[in-house]
Structures are given as structure tokens and as C-alpha cells.
Image (cartoon, grey):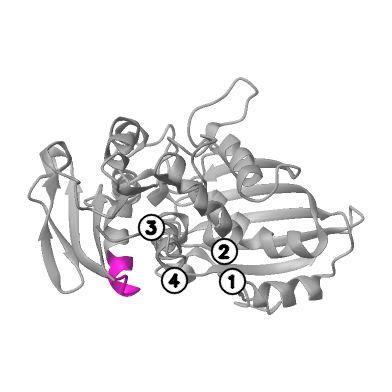
Amino acid sequence: MTYKVAVVGATGNVGREMLAILEERQFPVSDVVPIASRSSQGTEVSFGDDTLKTQALDHFDFAGTDIVLFSAGGKVALEWAEKIADKVCVVIDNSSAFRMDPDVPLIVPEVNADAVAGYTKKGIIANPNCSTAQLVVALKPLHDAATIKRVVVSTYQSVSGAGKDAMDELWTQTRGIYVNDPVEKNSFTKQIAFNVIPHIDAFMDDGSTKEEWKMVVETKKILDPSIDLTATCVRVPVFVGHSEAVNVEFETPLTDEEARDILREAPGCLVVDNREDEGYVTPVDCVGDFATFISRVRKDPTVENGLNLWVVSDNLRKGAALNAVQIAELMVNRRLLEAA
């Protein structure tokens, strides 16, 4: 059985990755339709060896479409996702618009696959925040083994998480600094080249940012509401690949050796932890890969049952496009979706 798939936001970083991953993983498509804004209508995008022209969201008829992978931002999702789902499509949305809606499942297939059955309430499934996705993939098998009480995470998030303009800004600033051009800021509140910015998304009343809040509430929804989590989210001058320093406190003892063995067997995880020069993973190493990489697993001697981890993943893949395609695969494999 094959399926007609539409990709909304097909000209953006994540949309292009969605098209690439659909082809790489040989998703059973009968037709793939790239969709973008009216201003981008006719823009060419690649799907395998084929070149496709985007169609305008305003004018596209979704009748007969089976799956819509949506990566056009929260505002557009709020306007269109429920209308599209009414056409008997399943919408898998990458924005934050529906993540905390109790009638919309928030899915990471390696973590809470069974929750996907709840899609029937609205016809929408939410993709988590990119930093949350890789975190819960690493935490899930450890939580199953020793029950997590508390997590402290500091993120080192690449500029691609803020879109193509942000990537261009890093490139332009970096080049400009070498030739003494003035630094111009558009995508970020401060200079991003040769700098780090402890500010992602808007500030909230308690002093945290919305990005940090997302990590807390999404982890609770996906993994376990009883887990206490605190986060500091930082933008770093890396083009692709999010990194996270994670401190975990468990209810029962878990050694670093046991944790490495558990993570080696866990779906979606790849342990690279040799305790020597180059025996760990950096963002450059993970670009283009499907896995969530885990390194620097070690005991935290300051608490009774604590471990430290270093978690790295391609944010455009596992943090967005790959996870969305995996959700579609999950629906197909569980026969939750009938082709139109």
C-alpha cells in the first residue's frame, strides 16, 4: 500500500530534510507534493533524483492526501492544520502549536509509540521541540531501568534550529569579523559569531525562556509527569547539531557501566564513549545521521544515584524531520492509516 504525502513548508530547512528522509527511508509514497507559501510557489525542491515544484498552500486541495508533514511554523499551523485534518488527512506538525493540547499526542516513536493512537481526536500529531526529542530518546531506557527523579540539562543549540536566515547570519558575521565589517544582528539578540547566547525564544515571568519551558513540559508529557527537570538553553555558533550536558538523578542505583550497556541496546541511541582523545561525539560528527549519540557517561558523586551524559544529535533530523517521518512510519506499521 502506498500513500500520498504532502510536505508543507517544503522550501525551509526542515521541509527539505523531510523530503530527503522520505526518499532515504523509502517511505511508501504514491505521490509527494511540496507545498509552500504563495510567494514561494514554483520554487524547485529535490526528492531523490526528481525535481518538484512547490504548490501554494492557499490553493492546494488536500482531498485525497493521506499524510501531511507540516513544518511552516506555529502561526500557519494554527490557521491550517485542523482544516487540513478535516479532509481526512493525518497532520504531523513540527511546530509548538499543538504540543500541549490534551487532544493531540506528542510523539517520539522510540519513547511513547503507543500514544499515537490518540491522533483520532483531532487528526493531528505533534512533533516535540528539537532539544526535547534527543533528550527523551536518551532518558527513556534509563528511566525504565532505574526511574528518573530529576534532570538538569544545559543545551548547546545550533543556529539551524532558528532557520535558514539564522544560518546565514552566522556565516555573514563570521566572514565579516575577519574583514572588519560591522556586525549586523537580525535573527539573534546578540552577536552569534564567536559567541554564545543564553537566550532562545521569549522570556517568561519566572525568568526562564519559552525554550526552557518547552523542554520541561514536553518531557513530562512524553516520558513521565513525575520527573523534575530544569533547563538552560543556549545558542552556539554551530551550523547543525544540538548538544546537551545532562545530569540525571535516579531513585535506584545505576552504574555508568550499566547505563552504557542499556543505552547501547536502546532504539535510536548510539554510544560513543571511549574516555580518550576523540572518544566522544561532537555536532560535526552527527550531521546527516539518524542516531542520538551519547558520550561522557560518568558517575555524579554529589548525589546518591547520579549520572552525567553528553547527548548530541542532528537537530534537523531527529529533532524535526526524521521524527516526523518516523511517526508516519509508525502509523503505517500499526495499520492506523488507510490510503485514500
Instruction: State yes or no: discs 4 and 2 in contact (Cβ < 8 Å).
Output: no
Distance CA(mark 4)–CA(mark 1): 14 Å
Dot 3 alpha-carbon crowd within 10 angstroms: few under 14, some 14 to 19, many 20 or more:
many
Distance CA(mark 1)–CA(mark 3): 17 Å
The residue at 42%/39% (across/down) is 122
Residue named by callout 4: 289
Dot 2 alpha-carbon crowd within 10 angstroms: few under 14, some 14 to 19, many 20 or more:
some
Q: Which mark is residue 110?
A: 2
Q: Position of residue 339 (x, y in %)?
A: 28, 61
The residue at 7%/50% (across/down) is 42
| Residue 189 position (above or below residue 225) | above
The residue at 55%/59% (across/down) is 113
Nearer the observer, disc 3 or disc 2? Answer: 2
Distance CA(mark 3)–CA(mark 4): 12 Å
Distance CA(mark 3)–CA(mark 2): 15 Å
Dot 1 alpha-carbon crowd within 10 angstroms: few under 14, some 14 to 19, many 20 or more:
some
Q: Position of residue 31 (x, y in %)?
A: 18, 63
Q: Position of residue 143 (x, y in %)?
A: 75, 59
**Along the line of sight, which residue is nearer the eye, 78 or 305?**
78
What is the span of residues highlighted in magenta in the rendered image?
20-28
Mark with earlier residue (3, 2): 2
Distance CA(mark 4)–CA(mark 2): 16 Å
Q: Position of residue 186 (x, y in %)?
A: 32, 34
Mark with earlier residue (2, 1): 2
- Amino acid at dot 4: Asp
Residue named by callout 3: 321
- The kind of secondary structure element at disc 2 is helix
